[in-house]
Amino acid sequence: MPMEAGSGTHGVYRSESGRAAVENYYRRALDEYRAVPLTRRTMATDFGKTQVFACGDPARPPLILLHGSMANSAAFLGMSLGSFYALSFAVASPERVSALSMLSTAGIAPQRKDFMLKALFCMLIGAPGKKLLNRLIYYKAEVPPQIHEFQALVSANFNPVTGAIPILDDATLKRLVMPVQYFGGDHDALLDTARTVRRLAALCPEAEIHLVPDTGHAILDQWPAIKAFLASCRSPGRQLPPSCPCQ
């Protein structure tokens, strides 16, 4: 999590007070809900000082979680924009990624243009629009009220990512030589999941692909499958599961 306010290209927060509010909320949430001890570390990045949380046995293979010091090789799990960042790192440095699990990732197929129009309309009508926007994003997912509260805090204090996310070309996606897992909701309002599934299956035929039915952009119930995938990537003689049929 970035810890510094700024302006321009690398300005993550809108103000120092906004940075403090988000960081304090994040700390309280981790203190309240964490199930295992955490170690807080600070790393220097292009976005300034960034807070990183580490947990678990340091002797075991690393897993890096992204939602928006690299080891020699690590497994990556990302969701939404964090998934795109994980994908971008995997194709740039495939030798440093032991496995890649992505949920609702961009960069494989175009974003839905109609969502941007709906989002602009929602922002113009205030609080009712924010609730409508949440319904578009989460669809039928049951989201705790704390998530909505944190999302509102972030929206008020972060400088949003603007512009279309670039689409990776065929040659770039074929650099995904590590075990790959993908989940996409069939009712994703932001991304064209069907096109993502077809393209990923064509370019990465050994990828484990899940088109999740009756699900939107937020995929919150697939941890058992993700855990099994990551565990199997560490197993000798791992057999890659077949991709699901593309619809």
Image: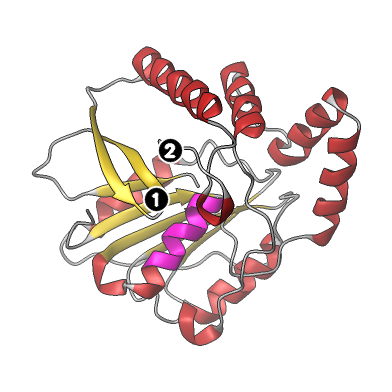
Q: As drawn, which residue projects farthest toward the top?
A: 32
The numbered disc on residue 146 is: none
Q: Residue, x 61% and y 31% (percent of image)? A: 157
In this rendering, does residue 241 appear at all? no
Which is more N-terminal, label 2 or label 1?
A: 2
Image quarter where the C terminus lies is bottom right
Give the magenta part as a residue range. Answer: 81-89
Residue, disc 1: 77
Q: Residue, x 44% and y 25% (percent of image)? A: 23
Q: As drawn, which residue projects farthest toward the left?
A: 59
Image quarter where the N terminus lies is top left
Amino acid type, callout 1: Leu
Q: Secondary structure at mark 2?
A: loop
Query: Above or below — where is 26 with respect to 172?
Result: above
Residue 145 image-quadrant placement: top right
Residue 60 image-quadrant placement: top left
Left or right of residue 125: residue 231: left
Give neighbour class at mark 1: few <14, some 14-19, many 20+ (Cα, 10 Å).
many
- Structural distance between the alpha carbons of marks 1 and 2: 25 Å
Q: Secondary structure at mark 1?
A: strand
Give the prevailing secondary structure in the magenta stretch: helix
Query: Above or below — where is 76 with respect to 123?
Result: below
The numbered disc on residue 4 is: 2
Q: Nearer the viewer, residue 12 or 139?
A: 12
